[in-house]
Amino acid sequence: MKESDRPTASRRRFLVYSTAAFGVGALGGVAGSLFWASNSTTFLTYVKGKRNAALSALARKVLPLQGHTIDVSFGDSIQRLVAAGVIAPDKFRRVYAKRGGLPDWVERLFTQASSAPITLSFQTAPYLLNLLWPLGVATKTQFNAKSPINGPKINQYASTGGWILGRAPRGGGYFNKVAAVDLNASQDAVVLEAAKNSYRPCCNNSTFFQDCNHGSALLGLYELAAAQGVNVNGLYKIGRIANTYWYPDEYLEMAYFFQTLKATPWEKLTAKTILDKKYSSFTGWRKNVHRPLVTAGLAPNTRFGSQSSCTV
């Protein structure tokens, strides 16, 4: 199997001895970095002074500061996770205690069902990542029985071993165990179809292969949406929105690539195309987006050969 097709689980494995740094730094530190990214990213900094006005307009189109509101709500899914021990609210609060505490809307989800539509923005994205992460790990589905992470090494992935905000020391024990979202057979199939075709630029694995927090979070969001009647194309649109706020640099570069080298506006691209392995996997993004921009002198070469961190 060639490198671009090889599952990258070994690079995504969770290191037990880095638990403290990952758990606190990763979960608590994303808010500031994501909010900062709304005004300045590595990519925007590089081109500042050259095409800054045009790129700023593009950035606001790809990543509007007001965010995107989707027709999906949490319902009582977070309450179900709390009841099952997947989320321990006190542990969750401790992570954010030195960072201003949790916003009221997060606190309410621990004890109350919510019909409010979810808004993905720079302000909400880090909290949503950490609420949706355990949802993707724990929700019982038909397809998770065949998940690539389902096996004796279940706790060695960043998604499962990295989840330390439940009553159990690691999240692997909760994998595919909790009826947090009610999916019928057809909805289960819709989630699986979208998950297998949705990638993220931190690795070469699909969302079905939920080996990191971002993969689990997007899977959890897909499960919520499908259970509320969203079809597969709607899932792709939601996935595009979530990924852009979780990986702002990569998707801003992608929008710039299509605009400058392919003469295709961001809004003309289908969400499925954006999330495809060709553009949204790490190898695909590096080869088909970043490398052409570097060659054309339109992007910095500093990130060449690196991977986006799943701890943001």
Image: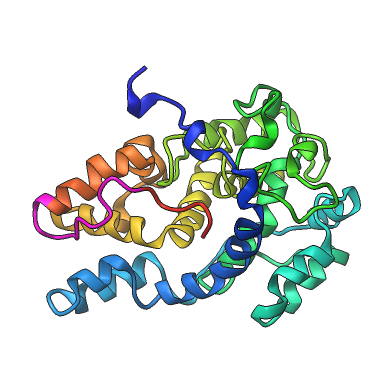
Q: Which residue is drawn at 18% across and 71% down?
A: 47
Q: Tell me which segment is drawn in magenta.
A: 295-306
Q: Is residue 297 magenta?
A: yes
Residue reaching furthest to the bottom = 100
Observer-nearest residue: 229 or 91?
91
Compared to residue 148, the image places residue 73 above or below, namely: below
Q: Using residue 20 as the reference point, say whether residue 54 is left or right of it.
A: left
Q: Residue at x 80, y 45 (%)?
A: 180
Q: Position of residue 90 (x, y in %)?
A: 83, 67
Compared to residue 18, the image places residue 279 above or below, namely: above
Residue reaching furthest to the left = 296
Q: Using residue 155 as the reference point, say whether residue 212 is left or right of it.
A: left
Q: Using residue 97 as the reference point, say whether residue 216 is left or right of it.
A: left
Q: Does the magenta stretch include residue 257?
A: no
Residue reaching furthest to the top = 1
Query: Which colouring convention does the figure follow?
Result: rainbow
- How many discs appear? 0
Q: Using residue 268 as the reference point, say whether residue 19 is left or right of it.
A: right
Q: Where is residue 214 in the image (x, y as percent from the top left)?
A: 55, 49
Q: Position of residue 99 (x, y in %)?
A: 64, 79
For the question of whether residue 302 can be seen, the reply is: yes
Observer-nearest residue: 156 or 256?
156
Q: Residue at x 35, y 61 (%)?
A: 249
Overall secondary structure of the magenta stretch? Answer: loop
